[in-house]
Every structure is written in structure tokens, then in C-alpha cells.
Image (cartoon, rainbow, N blue to C red):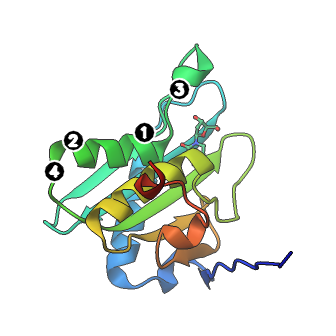
């Protein structure tokens, strides 16, 4: 038996104004998208913005449904739209902002496991890292240099 340790590294900015300008602008788009989320059931609003290498910015937000599992997270709404509209473009960066209507969300909220798996598919396909910035409504912003860093032990096409 041997022990295997897996490490992830995050970079944490004290607030959104500390971000590099391009990431700040993308986070603003994520916040705008969050404000348009359709989340009447959870009251948890999430917005995501993607910068593509063709300079397009794609945004998405969570879309809920009375049949709860039929809803979709913001990150997948955005990345599936990007994949469907610009199949040959690479995703350079993703910004995510999340906030609950029940309390002020001050901590960075990472993408859920299903969204990490979905983003991983595109990172593997494009063979270049996707930077991920994530935050609540206010406060600190976390950055991961790649999706792989957020999803060790990814399930990918190599096992199929
Ligand atoms: N949600 C997202 O949009 N992204 C995530 O990464 C986590 C959760 C949404 C799904 C649902 O509409 C609400 O937040 C509460 O789970």
C-alpha cells in the first residue's frame, strides 16, 4: 500500500478590484449574467462568463425548473452554448459569481462537480488550460490556473 497525495493550488484576491483588468471585465459580465438568473426555487443565483480565443464573450446563468433536476447550472449553460456556437474556439478564461437571495454570499463559490466535469471535457479537447475565477457577490475572488487543478482524478476519454 502506498499513500498518494493530490494537491490543488488557488490564488486568492482580496476583492474584485485586485484582479487583472481582463479578468475584472469578465467577472463584471458574470455578475451581470448572475442578475438575470432564473432561480425561483433555490434563490441561489449564479452567473458565468467565458472569454474565447476569438474574443467572443459568452455568458450564462442557472435556469431552474419546477421539475428540479431539469434545471441547469450557469457554468454548463455558458460552456455548452460556447461549444455549440463556436466549436473550434478555445476557452481562455471563465469567471463565475454566485449569490443567495437568502443571505449575502461573501465567500468564493467554486463550480459544482458536474460543472467541473463538463468544463474538463473542453479543456481536454482544446489542449490548453482554462483559467477559472470564482467569487460570491462580494469579497474574495479565487483563481485556479486550470480546470484540471479543480478536478483531480478526472474521468476522461482515455479510459473509454
Ligand atoms: N448552481 C450553479 O449554477 N452552478 C454551480 O456550480 C452550483 C449550483 C445552481 C444550480 C441551482 O439552480 C442553484 O445553483 C442551487 O444549487
C-beta proximity under 8 Å, tags 1 and 4: no
Q: Nearer the viewer, mark 1 or mark 3?
A: 3
Other-residue count near label 1 (Cα within 10 Å), few / some / many at <14 / 14–19 / ≥20: some
Q: Is mark 2 within 8 Å of ligand 1?
A: no
* Left-right relation of 107 to 146: right
Q: Is residue 52 left or right of residue 117?
A: left
Q: CA distance from mark 2 to mark 3?
A: 21 Å
Whether residue 34 appears in this view of the structure is: no
**Of pointers 3 and 4, the one earlier in the residue sequence:** 3
Mark 4, other Cα within 10 Å: few <14 / some 14–19 / many ≥20: some
Q: Nearer the viewer, mark 2 or mark 3?
A: 2
Q: Is residue 9 above or below residue 87?
A: below
Q: Is residue 71 above or below residue 89?
A: above
Residue 86's mark?
A: 4
Mark 2 lies on residue = 84
Residue that mark 1 sits on: 36
Marks 2/1: CA distance?
21 Å
**Location of ligand 1 given as a quarter of the image:** top right
Secondary structure type for disc 3: loop
Mark 3 vs mark 4: in front: 4
From the viewer's perspective, tell me whether residue 45 is left or right of residue 128: right
Q: Which residue is mark 3?
A: 64
**Where the N terminus falls, by quadrant?**
bottom right
Picture quadrant of residue 90: bottom left
Q: 49 or 5, which is in the foreground?
A: 5
**CB within 8 Å, label 1 to label 3:** no
Residue under the point 56% across and 73% down: 149
Contact between marks 4 and 2 (CB within 8 A): the answer is: no
Amino acid at each position: 500500500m502506498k499513500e498518494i497525495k493530490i494537491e490543488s493550488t488557488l490564488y486568492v484576491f482580496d476583492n474584485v478590484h485586485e484582479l487583472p483588468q481582463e479578468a475584472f471585465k469578465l467577472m463584471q459580465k458574470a455578475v451581470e449574467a448572475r442578475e438575470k438568473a432564473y432561480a425561483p426555487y433555490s434563490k441561489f443565483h449564479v452567473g458565468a462568463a467565458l472569454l474565447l480565443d476569438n474574443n467572443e464573450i459568452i455568458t450564462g446563468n442557472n435556469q431552474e425548473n419546477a421539475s428540479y433536476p431539469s434545471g441547469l447550472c450557469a457554468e454548463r449553460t455558458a460552456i455548452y452554448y460556447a461549444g455549440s456556437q463556436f466549436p473550434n474556439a478555445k476557452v481562455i478564461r471563465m469567471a463565475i459569481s454566485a449569490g443567495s437571495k437568502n443571505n449575502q454570499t461573501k465567500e468564493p463559490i467554486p463550480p459544482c462537480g458536474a460543472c467541473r466535469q463538463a468544463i474538463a471535457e473542453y479543456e481536454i479537447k482544446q489542449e490548453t488550460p482554462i483559467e477559472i475565477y470564482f467569487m460570491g457577490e462580494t469579497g474574495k475572488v479565487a483563481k485556479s490556473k486550470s480546470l484540471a487543478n479543480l478536478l483531480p482524478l478526472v474521468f476522461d476519454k482515455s479510459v473509454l
